[in-house]
Amino acid sequence: MARPSSRPADPQEAPRGSISSVPMHEIEPSPVDEEEDPFESLPLPATSKKTETSSNGTNFLGLTPSRTVHLLSSIQKYATVGPSLYLALHYTNTALIPLFTQSLSKSDNLLLLTRPYYQSFPLEPVLIFLPVITHVASGIALRIYRRRQNAKRHGAETHNERRSIPWPKLSLTSALGYALYPMFVAHVLVNRITPQKVEGGSSGVGLRYFAYGVSRHPWFANLGYAAMLSVASWHFVGGAAKYLKLSREYVTDGGDWGARRRRRRGWIINAISAAVAGAWIAGGLGVIGRAKNGGWRSWETVNWDKIYQAVPVVGKWM
């Protein structure tokens, strides 16, 4: 049996047209990354183009979508610092101190002593009003922006196509926040804006003013304030748990163990919210709202009647 020859093949013996028949110095170099992709010339689907634009493009501020969402989320989060400080003081004055003293006059005196520290200009707008408006506005902007990004990913260009895109899921904490905002505006209107308009200030508006209003319309005031305090308590506790990453969605364990941990975390947050709301209602309505203060007929009540009657929309019934 003849052994195969190990002698290298003669280039002249190679078939015509093969690469070995061409001298190496006559071949033009061609980098690998310049090789034409056979799929490059194919048109991309509309959804793929929209996805690439929405994920890699920037807005008029030069921010990517992920950076924009992070910025709006941070503004919404850190805008709660000032209102949280105010809430701690206000909760102490309207819930804990009345429960501890069981006295309207003592609680009102302590409120009037501490209130100038957070109701003076410019501390009050900077600490309360501007952060609350920023918190709500950034939350609305975040929902709108996320929906627009979803519309781009789905290739929705016309108004009718965008209408079919669902809004981002609304959590219970966010829903309670949107429900709380008109209640907060009404509370500020009755206790801050209207007294400023009628008397030029709210130095005489305290817990006794609140108790007098409850005594005039007990059913309306008790139901309204109980609803507002409950919504506020669940929103504040749930929001704090979310920002501290203690809420149930941050439990990452899977299976039955993870489901049990999420349920237990939800029960704990609901229990804390119920305790906060219960103490607030007991102190604000149970102690302050039930105080009579000698039948409520004095020169102060005459001025308070003028303030309540000047409240827009509902003042004519008060």
Image (cartoon, rainbow, N blue to C red):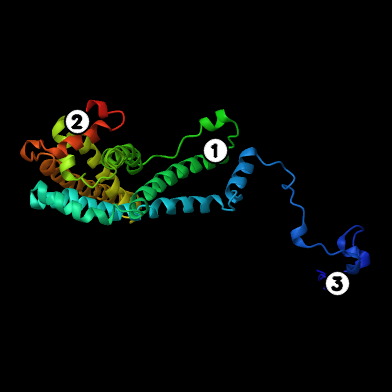
- Secondary structure of the residue carrying numbered label 1: helix
Outermost residue on the left side: it is 294
Residue 99 in the image: state x and y as whole percent: 11, 49
Which residue: 85% across, 73% down? 7
Q: Is residue 254 above or below residue 170?
A: below
Callout 2, which amino acid? Phe
Question: Disc 3 residue type?
Answer: Pro
Residue marked by disc 2: 220
Q: Which residue is mark 1?
A: 151
| Circles 2 and 1: CB atoms closer than 8 Å | no
Task: For marks 3 and 1, give the one nearer the viewer.
Answer: 1
Q: Which of the pair 116/168 is nearer the observer?
A: 116
Three-letter amino acid code at the position of disc 1 = Ala
Q: Name the residue that disc number 3 marks.
A: 8
Q: CA distance from mark 3 to mark 2?
A: 105 Å
Q: Residue at x 26, y 29 (%)?
A: 315
